[in-house]
Amino acid sequence: MRSIFKDQLNKAIKEYLKHIETFPKNKRLHLKLGDLHLKNGEKEKAVDEYLKAGELHVEEDLNTQAIAIYKKVVSIDPVHIKALHRIGALYVKEGFLGNAKSCYETILQISPSDQQAIEALSRIEESNQPKPVQTKMEKKESFPITSSEASHLPSLSNGIEIPSSSKDLELHYHLVLCLINKLNK
């Protein structure tokens, strides 16, 4: 009875392989083939098919589905670094920085010198740092006007020569801000 089941599995695997030759970008075929390999006890082949399916999902920007597939790989092989990296990167892309951080920390438990995980964690930590609060004046100064923009300020540009050098432009920018502040009082 067991050999009949094994024969049917092998026959199904061969059929799916033929279909994949015809439709190599079909995500569902790769997932099904992965499932068949897993049932057949061929974990490495199953993982390979799941990785292909995950990449196809990423290509179509189906990131949450790709994460689920990569998690399936990790459930089969908990130390599969490539799948963990993919999950971490997709978490970052989707804005789930806490999950990404956890994923990269797992990678570093497995491989403490993994440079890619170290750099990713560093970027996550940097992005979690609070941003400095800008005062009203700093906000105004963070959007300097260009000479072409200044020329569109008729009440301020009349009689004012717009400088060509960036140093002169910055000086005139601050003068224009002072004029604007005086006019607003």
Image (cartoon, rainbow, N blue to C red):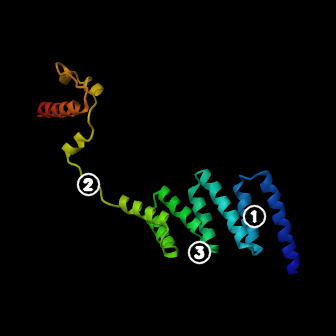
Q: Position of residue 16 (x, y in %)?
A: 80, 60
**Is residue 168 or residue 75 the one in the foreground?**
168
Specify whether 167 is left or right of 48.
left
Dot 1 amino acid type:
Leu
Spot the residue most to the bottom: 1
Report the Cα–Cα distance between label 2 and label 1: 52 Å
Residue at (80, 60) in percent of width and height: 17
- N-terminal of the pair, mark 2 or mark 1, is 1
Give the mark, 1 or 3, whose residue is nearer the N terminus: 1
Residue 71 position in % (x across, y down)? 59, 68
If you read the primary sequence from the N terminus, does the residue marked by circle 3 or circle 2 appear first? 3
Mark 3 = which residue?
78
Circle 2 is placed at which residue position?
A: 132
**Structural distance between the alpha carbons of marks 1 and 3:** 21 Å
Label 3's element?
Answer: loop
Residue 34: x and y, percent?
A: 72, 66
Q: Is residue 159 left or right of residue 77?
A: left
Where residue 57 sits, quadrant-wise, is bottom right
* Displayed quadrant of residue 148: top left
Quadrant, the N terminus: bottom right
Q: Secondary structure at mark 2?
A: loop
Q: Residues within 10 Å of mark 2 (few under 14, many from 20)?
A: few
* Cα gap from disc 3 to disc 2, whole angstroms: 40 Å
Identify which residue is drawn at 57% across, 68% down: 81
Horizontal and vertical percent for residue 117?
48, 65
Residue at disc 1, secondary structure: helix
Going by the numbered disc 2, the residue's amino acid type is Pro
- Residue on which the image places disc 1: 33
Residue count near mark 1 (Cα–Cα under 10 Å), binned few <14, some 14–19, many ≥20: many
